[in-house]
Image: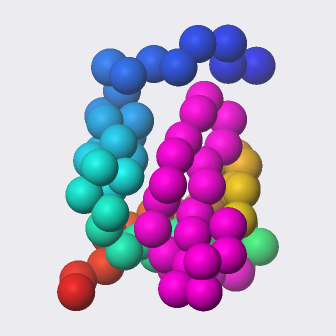
């Protein structure tokens, strides 16, 4: 289990930039589901995505197949 939030990792820094800049993001889960919204926060195990209807979804990072920023 991850015990410390490692901000030196490129993936962590990129997610922090997506949060800071409120970039619309697509997240595909290992189940095949695709979620879109803005990443609000992250910790070492999960992240929170907020969609256009202001609904929050907490996603376990282990469930993510890929994540990509969307163009406006």
- Is 55 contained in the magenta span? yes
Q: State the image quarter where residue 38 is shown.
A: bottom left
Q: How many marks?
A: 0
Query: What color scheme is it?
Result: rainbow
* Span colored in magenta: 33-56
**In the current view of this chain or complex, which residue is farthest to the front?**
54
Q: State the image quarter where residue 7 is shown.
A: top left
Q: Position of residue 48 (x, y in %)?
A: 61, 55
Is residue 32 depicted above or below 19 in this figure? below
User: Residue visible at 67% across and 67% down?
Assistant: 56
- In this orientation, which residue lies closer to the viewer: 28 or 56? 56
Q: Position of residue 42 (x, y in %)?
A: 54, 41
- In this orientation, which residue lies closer to the viewer: 4 or 53? 53
Q: Quadrant of the C terminus?
A: bottom left
Q: State the image quarter where residue 14 is shown.
A: top left
User: Residue visible at 45% across and 19% down?
Assistant: 6
In this image, 11 relative to 53: left or right?
A: left
Q: Main secondary structure of the magenta part?
A: strand
- In this orientation, which residue lies closer to the viewer: 23 or 27? 23
Q: Position of residue 46 (x, y in %)?
A: 66, 43
Q: Quadrant of the N terminus?
A: top right
User: Residue visible at 52% across and 86% down?
Assistant: 52
In this image, 8 relative to 44: left or right?
A: left
Q: Position of residue 53 (x, y in %)?
A: 60, 86
User: Residue visible at 48% across and 59% down?
Assistant: 39
**In the current view of this chain or complex, which residue is farthest to the top?**
3
Is residue 2 depicted above or below 59 in this figure? above
């Amino acid at each position: 289990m991850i015990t410390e939030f490692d901000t030196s990792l490129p993936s962590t820094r990129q997610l922090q930039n997506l949060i800071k800049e409120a970039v619309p993001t697509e997240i595909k889960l290992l189940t095949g589901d695709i979620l879109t919204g803005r990443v609000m926060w992250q910790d070492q195990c999960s992240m929170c995505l907020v969609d256009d209807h202001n609904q929050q979804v907490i996603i376990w990072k282990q469930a993510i197949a890929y994540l990509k920023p969307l163009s406006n």
